Image (spheres, helix red, strand yellow):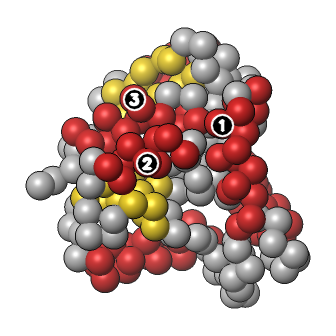
Amino acid sequence: LTLGDPSGRVILWTHGIYGHCRWPAALEARAAAEGLCLLVPIRAGFGGSDPVAGAGDPAVLAASDMAALIDWMQAGPVPVMATGADSASLARPEARAALLGSAEIALDGSGHFLPVLAAELTAQARNDWTGLLLGLRDALPVILLHGVDSLRHPAGLRAAGRAAFPWIAQHDIRGAGELLHVQIGDQLLEIARQHILD
């Protein structure tokens, strides 16, 4: 899924386990007007595509697919933006429209989504990502934004993350929970814009 001019400056957006591939329409239009392209690779098992074969690792496949797509587009290094899941964002009409518009890649009638969802939730709970995260230190900037109202990332967990990874720029966003792209999309777009190589 490509939102905006595919020849423009690319921002890679990962849709997460619930298929959040769309941004609020006004934000998508703003990105397009600024010559930005929000590139959203649809992962295996979503949107009617085949799930990961056999015992393959969905995260490894997704990463290699994204790298191949960026190479094919000759986009070079690009900002990568990812999102958490669960939120009170649905109370906002523009946010609800974006989230419901994204449902097409998860609830497409193929039956692939539920096994993919179960596998990804299991991987999130069981895998220790510490080594991979440490591998990014001094390699590229990592920025984490947490909604203060997030139930999955309470203050104590955020403090522990700061202590364990002091080199990561971590920001608490007041008045927000999760799905920050539909709550503070303008700020996310500005952060991504700062990391686009011209």
Q: Whole-Å distance between the Cαs marked 2 and 3?
A: 15 Å
Q: Which mark is residue 187?
A: 3
Q: Specify which label sits upstream in the sequence, 2 or 3.
A: 2
Q: Name the amino acid type tagged 3.
A: Gln
Give the image location of residue 78, x and y in percent. 28, 58
- Residue on which the image places disc 2: 29
Q: Nearer the viewer, residue 145 or 8?
A: 8
Whether tag 2 and tag 3 are in contact, CB under 8 A, the answer is: no
Q: Specify which label sits upstream in the sequence, 1 or 3.
A: 1
Give the tally of numbered discs.
3
- Residue on which the image places disc 1: 95
Give the image location of residue 165, x and y in percent. 39, 30
Q: Whole-Å distance between the Cαs marked 1 and 3?
A: 15 Å
Q: Specify which label sits upstream in the sequence, 1 or 2.
A: 2
Q: Nearer the viewer, residue 122 or 8?
A: 8
Image check: 122 left or right of 15?
right
